[in-house]
Image: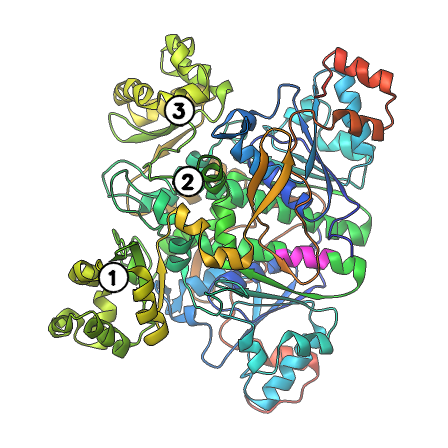
Amino acid sequence: MPDTTQRPAPLAGIRVLDLGQAAVGPIAAEYLGELGADVIKVESPEGDTVRRGRPTLRGMGHTFLGNNLTKRGVILDLKNPDDHAIAERLIATADVLIENFRSPAVLKRLGLGYDRMSEINPRLIYVQSSAYGPRGPMEGMTSNEWFAQASAGVTSVTGTPGEAGEFSRGTASMDWNGAFVNLEAILIALFVRERTGKGMMIYTSQFQSAMIASTTRIAEYFATGQVPKRMGSGRPNVAPDQAFRTSDGYVTASVPHNGFWPKLCAAIGRLDFATDPNYANNDLRVANRDALIAELEPIFRDATTSEWVARLRAADVPVAEFQHGPTLSASLLEHPQIQAERLMSVIETPWGPMATAEPHWKFDKTQARITRPAPAHGEHTQEVLAELGVQTGIR
Amino acid sequence: MPLALEGLRVIDCSQGVSGAFCAMQLGDLGADVIKLEPVTGDWLRSIGPYQGGESAVFLQVNRNKRGIGVDLKSPGGRDVLERLIEGADVLIEGYRPGKMGALGFGYDNVSHRNPRIVYCSISGYGQSGPWRDAPATELDVQTIVGANRHLGAPVAAPVRFGFDLAATAVGMAAFQAVMVALLWRERTGIGQHVDTSLLAAFTAVNQWTFSAEHSHDHWEGRTLLGLTDPPDHGFRTADGPALINMRGNEAAWNELLIAIDRPEVLLDPRFSTPQAIMDNVVALPNVINDTLGTWQFEDLRRLVQDRLGGTIVRMNDFDQLVHDPQVAALGMIQTISGHPTAGDVRTINFPWGFQDELAALRRPSPVLGQHTREVLREAGYADADIETLVATSAVYAR
């Protein structure tokens, strides 16, 4: 859809208090900010821990910069009675509060449990996003991206056959996945509130969210009882759907369902495969996978990656060029499809330019946008207090 | 108390996983979801493994829906969708951009008929651009965005992230967009066209990587810190690998090494100071795995977690995951009964913990055409007309 006009932000007028740390709380709040909410990040005097993570950009943790776009930042020491009172004033004005402490006990001990929050503001939506959820033997345990991946079974299905399992590195995939679930929860609650006039408390956990990410693999396991194994670039129940070595690298080729099989056969110049009874449908291709791949591998080795990309693209077969190599961001920023769809941009921040994803949804009557960079620690404390009408000295 | 989206009607015209997943979540929240498939069925039904003759993945992502088979190329079939659109709040489609328009069901036409409708398009690469018409799979998007560049060894065969993370991410992205549009509609009375793509959702999930690569003060490169410097495989126990985190507590590491009867490791300069342990923890598994490998996970858990205040989790395989007491405590796996051929089907529960009942597992996935007659009757078709549609293959009814 063309983006030539200023359309209104769909969640304008919603106020969000982000008491989260690191990722699963803050990223969900960031998305609400992209959708137009007024997001206030409430940090302790020590600040969000990922301000100090690596890598940094002019000394500021990159994770913080990427997870806290669109927000204003205030410092409140919730153990200090004056700041506690200010927090309560903010709660009175807010629609959503999200935090991802290890359990609801943390805010409760600070006198800001849901009982108190809902007493101040019955319309408040409170999301408590812990690592392992509100019950069970792991309740209250802390976690991190690696623990989330480990407990959800990522390493059991990621890696080279015969070798030990691997963690997915680079982005913290379970963190972002958990934030997606948190955003869902908040949007559901906002909708319910339109009907009931009331807020609510919602529990989410990284553990549950990670199981959502493994939906298809677990569904397959439920049917077979067979523990899925690591398959390199392949996939247990579809063939072919993997990387193939070319004369100068690797290309991925996929036949996600049978409509694409004759197209691949045409692209590789082997129409005889299209009528081979051993490969007539996905079930047969999976059953005869070893023979099939043994036939395909030498074919792919015989041309370059870019030749294969061109041939498969022309034949309407899903294909991608695999890149080993240290950096990708420059090429992604210049990727013609990323540019056409405006999926990434470089924004100016007080710490320098940074590349970021743009909002991942498009709307035809409203608009999501990145409204401002992440805040400096306490950058907007005075401004927010003034809005509340709070008299302050030097803080 | 009604479920969250009770009273809303959703038409799920998508095939495959992602659109179905979005529609499933709307159905979990109480919407009346009608899955509209071609008369030959959603292609996902042809992807194994199977339970009771039905695709396991299809069973998982199509619960809480009624199913009808409709040939949208036939006049009779088009009439069916036109009628259903009139009463619909949400329509979800996952076809190549322009295909629904070519069938006469693009957003312009549909919103003309029903201005309140929220119309959600899910594509591979987006509604515009040089790749708009190209088909996209999980593997394509993982590869293009570079999620799998950090897996495997630098010049060895590629390795994919073993979950279909992009497929579920875009399913959730679509759900988010639909909910935002429904909220907007509550305020304004107007519907909206929302769109997302595998590429958009997965680019968002991978923001950290390309953001960090693009501009940074100094960076070691491939990964985040500590336990995951490649290729790290955790600590070994008698029941498989585990991660251990003493949370910066040097005394706890010391006590662990003593408790497992490896005190000499403390003399190793790589592990003899707090900073050294933190800097070199990646090397620790190789040094102590032989010893740890004689410990049962549960005994090690009692030592690490209960006695020493650290955290430890097993690197679960799916048997271990599914039987994990934490999964049971949270009710993450439920059983839905009543599927005509698959019987009782285990399913992964929705991830939101509401205090009131706002979501529920109400019905299993439909077999093809299971509810065609029922839905058409509700839409005002007379029985004789329904049978004509069936006889001419404009619709499929079981």
Residue B197 percent coordinates (x, y): 55, 39
Q: Nearer the viewer, residue B152 or A287?
A: A287
Residue B100 horizontal side relative to residue A156, left or right: right
Mark pair 2, 3: CA separation: 22 Å
Residue A35 horizontal side relative to residue A243, left or right: right
Q: Residue flagged by tag 1: what amino acid is it?
A: Trp
Residues behind callouts 1 and 3 on a single chain: no
Q: Chain of mark 3?
A: A
Residue B207 percent coordinates (x, y): 45, 52
CB of mark 1 within 8 Å of CB of mark 2?
no
**Membership of A187 in magenta stretch:** yes
Residue A138 percent coordinates (x, y): 45, 65
Image quadrant assignment for residue A250: top left
Name the quadrant of the C terminus of chain A.
bottom right
Q: Residue at x 40, y 46 (%)?
A: B319
Give, as a single range, the part of the protein colored magenta.
Answer: A185-191
Secondary structure of the residue carrying numbered label 3:
helix
The residue at which mark 2 appears reads as B142
Mark pair 1, 2: CA separation: 37 Å
Q: Residue flagged by tag 3: what amino acid is it?
A: Val
Label for residue A286?
3
Mark pair 1, 3: CA separation: 39 Å
Camera-side mark, 2 or 3? 3
